[in-house]
Every structure is written in C-alpha cells, then in structure tokens.
Image (cartoon, coloured by chain):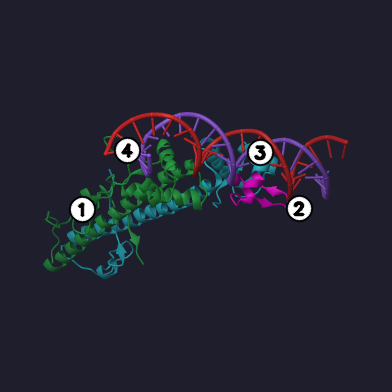
Chain colours: A cyan, B green, C purple, D red
Amino acid sequence: MATRRRRTSTRIEVTEDRGVFMISVAAELAEMHPQTLRMYEARGLISPKRSPKGTRLYSQDDVERLRRIQAMTAELGMNLAGVERVFELERQLERMSRRMEAAEREAERLRAHMEAELERMRREGRAELVPYRPGGLVPAKDLKRFRIPIDRAG
Amino acid sequence: MATRRRRTSTRIEVTEDRGVFMISVAAELAEMHPQTLRMYEARGLISPKRSPKGTRLYSQDDVERLRRIQAMTAELGMNLAGVERVFELERQLERMSRRMEAAEREAERLRAHMEAELERMRREGRAELVPYRPGGLVPAKDLKRFRIPIDRAG
DNA sequence: TTGCTCCTCACGTCACGTGAGGTGGC
DNA sequence: TTGCTCCTCACGTCACGTGAGGTGGC
C-alpha cells in the first residue's frame, strides 16, 4: 500500500491506508451491504484493520478496493473468483509497467551521458576513454552488463 | 492468431488457426459438453469457423482457448464475465511484453552501434560525426527522437 | 436407420447477496 | 433503551451447464 497523504482542512492528517471507517460507513461509501463486506473479508478479498475491541476499520484504500470490486461484480457481472484473478493480473501489469518506466528513465540517463561524451570527444579532437565523473561514460566492458531497450517515441 | 505450421508425418500441413474439428471432437479434446461450446459461442467467447453447410469447425487454437476457459471456470471457479475480462488483460500483458522485447532488441542494436563508433573514434584518434552507414552513429539531434530505456539485466 | 449436425427450451445446481436472529459493549 | 458491532444460518436469485426434444443432411 502507498503512503500518500491528504490534508483535510488544517487539522487532521490521514494516510490512505489508515483504518478510519467502521463497517456501516465503509459500506455506504462503497454502496454495499455491510454483510457483503464481511463476506468479502471471509473470502480474502479485503483485509480491513481492526480496533482493539475487534471492530473492523476500513481505510481509504480499502474503500477504493471495494468500489473496484463493486464495478467488477455489479457492472461486469463477474464473480469473486474472477475478481481475485483480475487483481493478480493487474498486479502483474502494474509491475511490468513500473519496470518499463524505470528502464526508460535509466536509458535516458545513459543516452545523455553518451551524447555528452561524444560531444566532449568531438570537441577535444581526441578520443579518450578515461573515466569521467559525474555524468561520464561507462567503460565498454561494463556496458555489456546492461541491456538497453529503445522505444521510438512518436 | 498466429500462422505457425505443424507437419503431421509427411502428408498434411495444418495451420493452427484452421478449422478442422467438428463440435463433438472439439468438445472431447477440451473435455466439455458440446452444448457448452455452443453456449460459449453465443456468448462471444469463441468463434469457430463454419463449413459451407453451417457445421462448426474448431481449430487447434480454438481448442487451446477452450482448454484455457475450462481451466478458469472449472479449476478457479470463475464465471464467463471473468473469463472475458481476463482475456482482455492478458492481451494487454502480451502487448506490453512484446513492446518490451522489441525495445530491448532495438536498444541492444543501438548500444552496439555506439560502442562501435566510440571504438572507431578511439582508433582514428579523431572525433568525426559524419554519417557512417550501415551501423553508423545517429546524429545527436536525431537521437533526441528516441527514448532509450535501460534495464540492468542481472 | 444410425449418428452426427443444427436449434430452442427447461431444469438442477451453485455462488452470491442479503436478511434474520441472537450477542455484547459504548 | 437505541444503535451500532460481532457472529452464524438460511433463503431467493441468477448464471451456468447440461439434458431433452425436434430438424435436417451425409
């Protein structure tokens, strides 16, 4: 879970994974029957926090998740087994997407270094491959430790 | 659908998307009731070819798809709405995965060119950035048209 | 005729949602 | 006491699978 923060007026700071809603409130926010929320928990689809007395406490993220389940079951007509599987696949997509973004950032950095180095060599009229930091060239042998994807962007 | 080919002994060449099985055979291969196959078609989950007389003809790919549906419904307990959604997400994953592979291949190509060019400059003792093809350097201004992701590969 | 195909209709089963019913602590 | 919480049990509904029943062409 993320730890994004949100300020409500100037008084209270609430992280979105903090349990704040009791079941009746969470159910209303998600437009579900409270009993349905208990059922989803029994199925392992949602895991609200508990107060010391045992009362379920749902977070913003929990409510968001409930709404996503609601969309899949009510609008698409999916059953809970399908919802579970979709959550798994979405995690995969998320992970892959993040890898791709990280790769693109890293590549842009390297590309800039290479460009800078070529520019330097052009200027100096002499090709030296001494380490040059920061922002220097990576020695060719180390380069082999990278796989460098390129994406023609527009 | 792919157009992979398979040779059976030396006589017949069958593409995997060619309709070859009538419904009773396809149903047996997929371990399903024939009526279930008709139902899936009505739901748009599968689209077998038809003979001129109207008889359904299922391909290898169709049977494979039926087996995947069977796994999702029988083993995971998913309903058909969930199966549809999972197919969509898997298409997305597939596409993203292909993009990633293509990007990595393209990057490796560029990396090799850059390395070769650096080597050339080092050897000639002089930095020239004249176009040098094939396998030559991309002029810096054109380079900006690329986004070059890097992935630290083990 | 037999065994397949096509189709539609109907029924049994099961998952899911929800209500009831009884408990306990602010 | 009221209104919430907790829990379990049970019922209604609906999707799905499958069987029946009737047709038609190798």
Please tell me whether residue A38 belongs to the stretch shown in magenta: yes
On whether disc 2 and disc 3 are found on a single subunit, the reply is yes
Read off the magenta span.
A37-62
Task: Give the quadrant of residue D12.
Answer: top right
Left or right of residue B61: residue A93: right
Q: Which mark is residue B12?
A: 1
Q: Kindly identify which chain the residue marked by label 2 belongs to.
A: A
Q: Amino acid at mark 4?
A: Thr
* Tag 2 residue: A53
Q: Is residue B40 visible?
A: yes
Q: Which mark is residue A10?
A: none
Q: Closest to the observer: A23 or A151?
A: A23
Mark nearer the N terminus (2 vs 3): 3
Q: Amino acid at mark 1?
A: Ile
* Tag 4 residue: B55
Left or right of residue B76: residue A8: right
- Label 2 element class: loop
Real-space Cα distance between discs 3 and 4? 48 Å
